[in-house]
Amino acid sequence: MMSITRQQAWDLLTKYNEEPFHLRHAITVEHVMGWFSQELGYGQEKEFWSLVGLLHDLDFERWPEEHCVKSQELMREAGVEEPIIHATASHGWGMRVEIKPEHEMEKVLYAADELTGLIGAAALMRPSRSVADMELKSLKKKFKDKKFAAGCSRDVIARGAELLGWDLDKLLDMTLRAMRQEEAAIEQAMTDLVKKD
């Protein structure tokens, strides 16, 4: 049982994040992580995987220089349990922190975080502005083009695939499938957000 609810996690996220770009990323990674939990046989842990996805960039908007360090402090203050704190911080491994992704869920977060950004940017370039009709070969082209979405680290994505013991194609394909299947839910969450404001 999780001691933090989705609503509490959302309240914590929106206490420190207000940029729609960051909120969309958090919601996207939340849904992608939930999809992966079921796909990889951790369906009973879906809530945990999803919350980790939602909170992984808690500190990034306000404290980019302390990313994955400040978030640990903020979550402890809010009473978030240690497995979530460890998992969210581990996606900064080798960059900000020395907390290596150990659990498969942490490896998926590390691998898929930057990749969701790349796929999202690629979707915006399409006439449909959607991932629904995006194919793997088109994504691979964008991945190879270092100038495209230059802020999305190809090295981290490749290292993430390696951590998981997957080839890059498998990671690209699965993350694209996750974003395809979750696209409607992500858009709905963003629409609800706008309505609240």
Image (cartoon, rainbow, N blue to C red):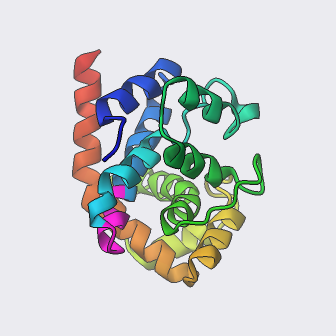
**The furthest residue to the top:** 197
Seen at 26% across and 62% down, the residue is 181
Give the percent coordinates (x, y) of residue 30: 38, 48
Comparing 134 with 20, the one in front is: 20
Q: Main secondary structure of the magenta part?
A: helix
Comparing 40 with 141, the one in front is: 40
Q: Would residue 191 appear left or right of 99 to someone viewing this image?
A: left
Comparing 127 with 28, the one in front is: 28
- Residue 178: quadrant of the picture: bottom left
Give the percent coordinates (x, y) of residue 85: 56, 43
Quarter of the image with the C terminus in it: top left
Seen at 44% across and 25% down, the residue is 12
Comparing 76 with 196, the one in front is: 76
The range drawn in magenta is 34-42
Indicate yes or no whether the magenta region holds residue 35: yes
Q: Would residue 60 appear left or right of 179 to someone viewing this image?
A: right
Indicate yes or no whether the magenta region holds residue 27: no
Q: Is residue 60 visible?
A: no
Seen at 42% across and 67% down, the residue is 175
- Residue 43: quadrant of the picture: bottom left
Seen at 50% across and 75% down, the residue is 171
Image vertical order of residue 21 relative to residue 135, above or below: above
- Residue 74: quadrant of the picture: top right
Give the percent coordinates (x, y) of residue 106: 54, 60
Give the percent coordinates (x, y) of residue 161: 59, 75
Q: Is residue 53 visible?
A: yes
Image vertical order of residue 11 relative to residue 83, above or below: above
